Image (cartoon, rainbow, N blue to C red):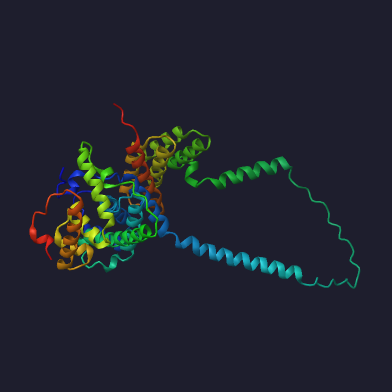
Amino acid sequence: MTLPEGVPVDDVVRRTLAGDRTAEGLLYRRYAPIMLSMATRLLHSVPAAEDVVHDAFIIALSRLSQLSEPAQFRGWLSTIVVSLVRRRMRRERLLRFVGFEPEAENTLEALAKPGTSVEARGELALLEVTLRELPTNLRLAWSLRYIEGEKLEDVAALLNKGLSTTKRYLAAAEERIAQRVAIEPPEREEEVKS
Amino acid sequence: MTLPRDVKRLLDEPEVEASVARTWVRMVQTRSGSRPVGRLVLVSAVVTALVGWGVFAMMREPAPVFEPAVALQPVVVPSVATPSSNLASVMMQGRSRRLARPPEQDSGADVVGELLESSVEAFVQGDAQRAAVLLEETVTHHAEDARTTEALVTLGWLQVEHLNQPEQAVHTLNTALERHLSDELFDRAWPLLQTARAKAAAKPKKP
């Protein structure tokens, strides 16, 4: 599911812009699996992740001419995906508030690797519940940083927020998560301080 | 038990192969969605106009009938000898046969055309296996012919939808996609490739 080696992404983006449908398909083949994995981990639901990635590609392909640096396609697409994930999380939070609990079949516990201890699975389930209760920005910031493993600067860029705001989100999320879930403290102290 | 900070380390990569295929099919449908709507509007307008015209014609008063001033005499046409129906039918059949064939087919040059035609016939008669063999023959021995690209996509379709050979279909469709496909062919080939991949992944492996 990847592009042939040696085909630079900016070249494929330019070919797509020129109307080459094969290049468009290649672009999809390279990035759809990555985006679907990320969206599934963030939303804990395959249908929801499919909706988000579908919409993200439709938006990205229709606005491709606005991408100033074609080589940055992945980051740009990720920003669109995260923005749609945030919208989806907000809607789910609202639905939960009015009593409709959306189904989540791909929970963190369900995604745990075979061989993960029962205790660790329990903590993952607890983390899942805690994350769901967090405000959307906090949940998204923490998930991108510690579940997706993105760098702090990248989390800020994906959220379209400043570095200090992102740190504040992370600190607030950390405070609530640490109260309920047994998790290692963050490596760098400054990341959780605003 | 304390969770590691890098939670991702504990998680498996979600299975996304089937999602990739499904999402692509949806994207193709979404992006071509505007055309059917436009066509629907046009067809609705035409139907409305026709129905309106019909109702108007029915409600209208009948047109006055004018009697001829002079009585017309019947005209007698002399009978003409016609060729026997058997001969006419043979001629027409021969003519239509000649018209249906391209000129080079008579000289036996259009082997690819013959193969494709035979493949369609085999499939219509329910022999998908033979249809696939004929298509394989076409793409293997007549690769220089432009029609083999479509033959490849059709072969891939047969392998994935009728012969339960998703692995071969993946190979066939990848070969087709490496060529320069028209938009229409690409739209057929790409979802098929995704379906073939999903089926190949779901197929139990032989021990």
Q: What residue occupies the far top of the structure in this picture?
A: B207
Residue at 31 percent across and 66 percent down: it is: A63
* Residue B27, x across and y down, in percent: 38, 56
Q: Nearer the viewer, residue A174 or B47?
A: A174
Residue at x 24% of width, y 48% of height: A126
**Image check: A92 left or right of A158?**
right
Q: Residue A34 location, x and y as percent?
A: 25, 51
Q: How many marks?
A: 0
Q: Position of residue B73 (x, y in %)?
A: 90, 64
Residue B124, placed above or below residue B37: above
Check the image and report above or below for A76 versus B108: below
Q: Quadrant of residue A71?
A: bottom left
In the picture, the quarter occupied by the C terminus of chain A is bottom left
Q: Is residue B61 visible?
A: yes
Can residue A154 be seen by looking at this rendering?
no
Left-right relation of B41 to A12: right
Q: Position of residue B176 (x, y in %)?
A: 34, 46
Residue extending furthest toward the front: A179
Q: Residue at x 67, y 65 (%)?
A: B51
